[in-house]
Image (tube, grey):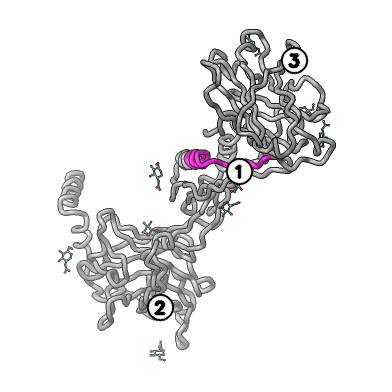
Amino acid sequence: MKLILAITFALLASAFGQDVILRAGQSGQFPIFPYCLCKATGAYRLENTVTFKGNSTYCFKVRVSIPANCSDYCCKQADLKKLEINVKPTCNVAGVALTATLNGAPTAINPNFELAPQGPLNSTIVKVTQLGLNLANANGAEICLSLGTNRAGKGCTTLEQLCVPPAGAPPGVCSAALFNSNNNCCPTTDVNNAAPPAAPPSEPIQLSVRTCSTCVNFTLSSGPGVIPYNFTQAQCAAYAKAVAAGFLNAAFQASTEVFKNFTLEVCSGRVVSVCGKFEDYKGALVAPYADDLASEFLSLVVPGGAPPPYLLGHTIVVTISSEKSNELVGRRLLQTSLYECPLAEKSLPLAPTNVTFPKCICNTTQGVMPFATLPFYTTKTGVSKGSKQYCFTFTTITPLSGPCANTNFAKVEFWANDTAPVRRGLKGFYVRSAKQTAFTFLFPTWSGSGDETVRATGLDWNQQQANGAEICMELDNSVSLDAFCLGPYSKGCYVNIFDKSKNCCPLYTAIDAPFVP
Ligand SMILES: *[C@@H]1O[C@H](CO)[C@@H](O)[C@H](O)[C@H]1NC(C)=O
Ligand SMILES: *[C@@H]1O[C@H](CO)[C@@H](O)[C@H](O)[C@H]1NC(C)=O
Ligand SMILES: *[C@@H]1O[C@H](CO)[C@@H](O)[C@H](O)[C@H]1NC(C)=O
Ligand SMILES: *[C@@H]1O[C@H](CO)[C@@H](O)[C@H](O)[C@H]1NC(C)=O
Ligand SMILES: *[C@@H]1O[C@H](CO)[C@@H](O)[C@H](O)[C@H]1NC(C)=O
Ligand SMILES: *[C@@H]1O[C@H](CO)[C@@H](O)[C@H](O)[C@H]1NC(C)=O
Ligand SMILES: *[C@@H]1O[C@H](CO)[C@@H](O)[C@H](O)[C@H]1NC(C)=O
Ligand SMILES: *[C@@H]1O[C@H](CO)[C@@H](O)[C@H](O)[C@H]1NC(C)=O
Ligand SMILES: *[C@@H]1O[C@H](CO)[C@@H](O)[C@H](O)[C@H]1NC(C)=O
């Protein structure tokens, strides 16, 4: 029998909606806020002015203020457990966002709307409870209430919409009561909403969010004797794309999200900066991934294997740095300790790979002579039928000090496969000093078999002649550059510049194009 009754009750409840049952429970015994039997004088009150913090957040400040002629329990001993505000029933819609903080930290229990059990039909309050305040710690405590709507956009988001003003008061004035744990003290204050500060019209959302503004910077530096490399637009774009994907992936791994996707901000040659944003604690969730991400980003610039020739003598630094924005938001925040942003730094100095070239003993250090090979060759159709030219360009640099600093450009040697079929593929060299427009043909001179060395010799250029000079190697189309030039680089050749004494031989590599991941 009991079971049947219970089922019937449950059916009724769902048929009419739970509110019907609860409304029916409102006794109407206490027609006036705070809708219960309690003492209206006590130790606590709210400051009369409410502070608007943006994003529908209103803050109430508590004062311990004991009336002079009062010495009863409510004035001398009562604690402060909850805040109740007299609100309009129409604001009590299902699923509205409502949160509160006490001194900046989320309250132990989320605030909620309630029908006042002993109030008249539909009388409604907002309750913020488990405040845990007392005479010792309540003075100055700040309780902030964040109003929101439900998914359908229903709900009250201003005090004007929310509060039932006391008799004769204009909209926006609220009645609020402060209860002790026994609910027998309920000093009540009427509070006014201070005029909201004029919000700047642009980006109101940005202003009210606490964020990490995170940038990944790729920075190049180089010492003397090196041709400084500039990142290309294509590299900047590729790095930016990879950084955006890397952070999306890290956020996904951390079960969180990026607030603003990473995009390219600076592509200035020596610096590439790719920036995005995280919302407070979400940045903290991604922070543990920063170190691995920085390594991953470094490998975009320096792929595995031999370092790109154009970066030799450079140091590449990848930093992940973040700036915290200071704005507080009107909603749940994690403790400051959890508001951390991604930070990391990885760097790599790039030195040439050791190779078994040249075969003679001389100073191969880049920068010892006042000449360098540009890191990229160009190609064009060869003079003889079915051939192609690979043209290496030379430039002048400020050399490292030493015995090679004051030398001429006597010849260049290439590291090449000297087995018969490959060797026959080389038709010869077409050379042009910076002072000439026409190319001169030069027969190749091979070293002894097995030396893997072919030279364009008899040049003897001074600085003016070398600065912009070109040496084009003409290869038959039956022999690819990869088959002809030896060494670890694909589509790359080792180019060895010599002075007359053969003691100075800075070794350079030229490849087809910069590496774009
Ligand atoms: C306290 O004093 C105020 C006026 O100063 C008076 O209105 C109030 O009734 C007094 N309360 C008690 C409990 O004596
Ligand atoms: C109480 O609320 C219900 C539902 O919103 C409404 O239909 C009814 O008119 C209200 N009654 C009073 C007395 O305000
Ligand atoms: C504003 O407050 C609402 C409700 O508390 C919350 O859902 C929303 O994320 C907040 N918006 C911002 C930008 O803080
Ligand atoms: C990263 O680059 C941006 C833009 O150039 C700059 O504002 C920022 O200070 C750089 N950060 C670091 C850590 O170098
Ligand atoms: C790199 O860029 C700077 C200016 O941004 C320019 O002066 C320099 O010549 C460039 N270097 C190369 C190798 O292109
Ligand atoms: C970031 O980019 C991804 C992929 O393009 C997209 O799915 C996501 O919505 C973007 N996030 C933001 C906050 O714009
Ligand atoms: C290259 O050779 C030099 C001198 O022989 C040696 O000190 C250096 O460790 C070598 N580097 C690598 C990467 O093998
Ligand atoms: C090559 O020359 C440079 C600059 O003069 C010098 O610092 C370096 O020690 C030399 N290296 C060798 C192997 O002689
Ligand atoms: C040179 O070319 C020959 C013929 O293609 C090949 O067998 C040999 O392995 C090559 N030598 C080197 C050092 O790559």
Residue type, numbered disc 1: Val
Is label 2 in contact with label 3 (beta carbons under 8 Å)? no
First-in-chain label (2 vs 3): 2
- Give the camera-side residue of 371 and 275: 371
**Residue 11 seen from this side:** yes
- Where does residue 324 sit, x and y in percent of width and height? 53, 57
Q: Nearer the viewer, mark 1 or mark 2?
A: 1
For residue 447, which numbered disc appears in the image?
Answer: 3
Which residue occupies 53% across, 53% down?
338
Query: Which one is in front, 164 or 21?
Result: 164
Nearest to viewer (mark 2 / mark 3): 3
- Assess whether mark 2 and mark 1 are in contact (beta carbons under 8 angstroms): no
Q: Secondary structure at mark 3?
A: loop
Q: Is mark 3 within 8 Å of ligand 9?
A: no
The image shows residue 209, relative to residue 52, as above or below, that is: above
Q: Which residue is mark 2?
A: 49
Residue topped by disc 1: 318
Task: Compute the Cα span from label 1 to label 2.
Answer: 50 Å
Q: Amino acid at mark 3?
A: Ser
State which mark lies toward you, 1 or 3. 3
| Inter-mark Cα distance, 2 to 3 | 93 Å
